[in-house]
Image (cartoon, rainbow, N blue to C red):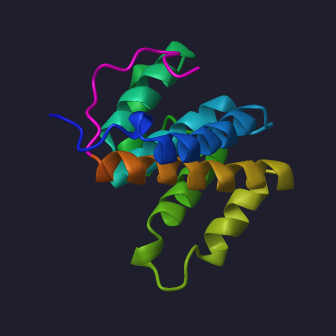
Amino acid sequence: MEARLNLMASPVAAKALKHIVAAGRALAESTLPAATRELVMLRASQINGCAGCIDMHTKDAAHAGESPVRLNLVAVWREATVFTEAERAALELAEQGTRLADAAGGVPDEVWANAARYYDEDQLAALVAQIAVINAFNRGNVITRQPAGDYQVGQFA
């Protein structure tokens, strides 16, 4: 598969992506657990069908010590017993925040309240921003058909 567009070769796209990457780096400094961030990015990427981000986040998470079992079960997290209640709340918020068009009312209050049981205000802000950032990356990659499989851990660090 060939990408439709090399985003990094476009001065306009590269400039915009630089800011999105910077936002992602800022989120890495938050108190939201790194494992939660990776699980959320992986789940949103699965929903959006973003092969490049799925490739990246499974490899980054595995490199950081995440188990293959948990990574393989993210797609079916509701039925899996390997996630904490806090991770489940974050995954539900990620799904609802990614599937905004599927619900006329946006993210249900119950989903937000459940996430707020496990995460403080700063962590919730980081979680919301992480969901927004990964959805931005997913959309750019899917629209331009970025291929997957060649990502190396730390490649974009």
Magenta portion: prevailing SS class: loop
Residue 123 vertical position relative to residue 18 in the rendered view, above or below: below
Between 38 and 147, which is closer to the camera in this rendering? 147
Q: Residue at x 51, y 24 (%)?
A: 61
Residue 77 at least partly seen: no
Which image quadrant is residue 69 in? top left
| Residue 46 picture location, percent across and down | 36, 46
Say how many tags the image has.
Answer: 0
Q: Is residue 125 magenta?
A: no
| Residue 129 picture location, percent across and down | 67, 53
Between 121 and 147, which is closer to the camera in this rendering? 147
Residue range in magenta is 145-157
| Residue 82 picture location, percent across and down | 50, 34
| Residue 100 picture location, percent across and down | 48, 72
The C terminus lies in quadrant: top right
Q: Is residue 155 magenta?
A: yes
Which image quadrant is residue 38 in? top right
The N terminus lies in quadrant: top left
Between 47 and 3, which is closer to the camera in this rendering? 3
Q: Residue at x 64, y 73 (%)?
A: 110
Residue most extreme to the right: 121
Residue 137 at least partly seen: yes
Residue 80 vertical position relative to residue 47 in the rendered view, above or below: above
Between 133 and 68, which is closer to the camera in this rendering? 133
Residue most extreme to the front: 11
